Amino acid sequence: AQTVTQSQPEMSVQEAETVTLSCTYDTSESDYYLFWYKQPPSRQMILVIRQEAYKQQNATENRFSVNFQKAAKSFSLKISDSQLGDAAMYFCAYRSADTGNQFYFGTGTSLTVIP
Amino acid sequence: DAMVIQNPRYQVTQFGKPVTLSCSQTLNHNVMYWYQQKSSQAPKLLFHYYDKDFNNEADTPDNFQSRRPNTSFCFLDIRSPGLGDAAMYLCATSRGGGSYNEQFFGPGTRLTVL
């Protein structure tokens, strides 16, 4: 099974500043998908951003962007202009393009936004 | 809006008393998942259905079972809950077959075992 590692259990950022959350993964596959999910306290898990492995261009969604380094098997999430509502657990996840149905999650990073 | 619905949101049961958690979806996704999530941890996959094909994780205890009577509904049965089974249970759906599409999660059912 693929493994996903988030080495930062907790992070904090000042409101309006930028923060980067790290994620690395281990796979022998060449085609796969990567996701960042956000889980606010006591609320539903939602998708933040996704990346297709065969696309070199880094995905962006408004204030959220990724730095995808395929050779290094790294997939970090950058949050710009951090807002109080960004406070949440963030999970990195991997999905194979071939075997496909399982999502492998990292252990999560708890992000605190300081007013 | 298309969504994933879980009932109940909070469930209290007694040690050893069977409990059933429910999940329904209006997304018409062919894959449905059950996860167990304990405080501040990653969701742990228990099993998933790809259409009617049931896929059990190797380390899922026999105490946990699932049923998917149709595309829209999926149930999680805990036959004899122990104190260690107290957790949030998340249902999720996705399109199957190595899809680019993400999982959609329900709000979860928080299970308390007394």
Image (tube, coloured by chain):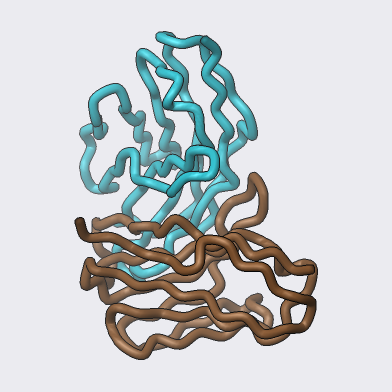
Q: Quadrant of the C terminus of chain B?
A: bottom right
x 66%, y 55%: residue: B38
x 51%, y 34%: residue: A88
Q: Position of residue B23 (x, y in %)?
A: 41, 72
Picture quadrant where residue A8 is located: top right
x 52%, y 79%: residue: B76
**Residue B84 vertical position relative to residue A74 in the rendered view, above or below:** below
- Locate residue B83 relative to residue B3 in the image: left or right: right
Q: Position of residue B75 (x, y in %)?
A: 47, 80
Picture quadrant where residue B54 is located: bottom left
**Residue B57 vertical position relative to residue A22 in the rendered view, above or below:** below
Q: Quadrant of the N terminus of chain B?
A: bottom left
Q: Position of residue A66 (x, y in %)?
A: 34, 31
Q: Position of residue A82 (x, y in %)?
A: 41, 17
- Locate residue A19 relative to residue B39 in the image: left or right: left
**Residue B79 visible at all:** yes
Q: Which colour denotes chain A? A: cyan
Report the chain shown in brown: B
Q: How many marks?
A: 0
**Residue B62 visible at all:** no
Between residues B91 and B42, which one lies in front from this camera angle? Answer: B91
